[in-house]
Image (cartoon, rainbow, N blue to C red):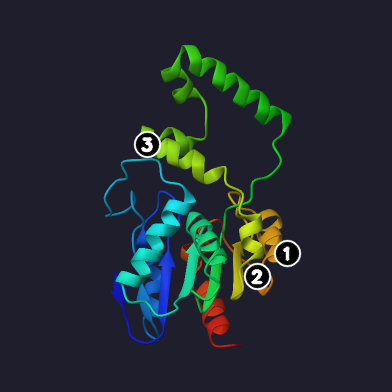
Amino acid sequence: MREGEGQDILLLHGYLSKKESFYYQIKFLSRFYRVTAPDFPAFGASAPITSAWSVGDYCDWLDKFIKAAGLNKPVIIAHSFGARVAIKYLSSRPCAAEKLIITGGAGIVKPRSKKYLRRVKAYRIVKKFFPKLAEKKFGSKEYRTLPPVMRESYKKIVNEDLKDCAKEIRCKTLLLYGADDTVTPADEEGKIFNSLIPCSELKILQGGHFCFSENPAPFNDAVYKFLNGD
């Protein structure tokens, strides 16, 4: 999807989401910029993946997409999983984006609790003898909805800690997190990324993990001001 003219803006959606999640941003930003919003492979209208992709695989796809789409050092706006891809992508390509905007960004692997470790141990035991039961009873609700290849991809994605990648980002970055986000809380992911990304600013907005679609006006206003140096 592409709308508008001017400086390139690239929108990267979250996991199990699609480009249409940025509906309000596409309509607003395309008044001033050339906005491009793809579906990641395996999501939206894109073809499914046939092997378990990692964040790095999605970065390789993104590099090819940017070149094929003729995007010139775009501003990247990335949500949740899309932020994982953007952070890793820009960590090795410091001049690939003009600016970066992260909303509900994921990619911090927190210390595992004893309860979590016990559950993992139980999962491995059950999986050894009753694999179908293990897949049905263990894991997050999001994980249990996925087909086998996507489950393996999901595990690769969520178990990669991107703190070191965040330290390598050199473009000016705006972090926008919802005050009620329980998926990637501002007091956790938001503040950690803010401390790691050198030229970053953290702002807390009303709303949850999808604050950009729940309350688009303040989100769009913050983006516009950031892009125009206000």
Q: Where's the N terminus, which quadrant?
A: bottom left
The correct choice, above or below, for 188 with respect to 197 in the image is: above
At a point 40% along the width and 53% down the height, the residue shown is 17
The residue to which callout 1 is attached is: 195
Label 3: element kind: helix
At a point 69% along the width and 71% down the height, the residue shown is 198
Q: Which mark is residue 229?
A: none
Residue 65 percent location from the top left of the image: 34, 65
Could you tell me the amino acid type at mark 2? Lys
The residue to which callout 2 is attached is: 203
Locate residue 220 relative to residue 170 in the image: left or right. Answer: left
Q: Residues within 10 Å of mark 2 (few under 14, many from 20)?
A: some
Residue 143 percent location from the top left of the image: 46, 36
How far apart are labels 3 and 1 at the CA level?
34 Å
How far apart are labels 2 and 1 at the CA level?
13 Å
Q: Is residue 4 visible?
A: yes
**Which is more N-terminal, label 2 or label 3?**
3
Q: Which mark is residue 149?
A: 3
The correct choice, above or below, for 31 with respect to 166 in the image is: below
Residue 7 percent location from the top left of the image: 41, 85
Label 2: element kind: strand
Q: Residues within 10 Å of mark 1 (few under 14, many from 20)?
A: some
Q: Nearer the viewer, mark 2 or mark 1?
A: 1
Locate residue 2 relative to residue 160 in the image: left or right. Answer: left
Q: Is residue 37 visible?
A: no
**Which is more N-terminal, label 1 or label 2?**
1
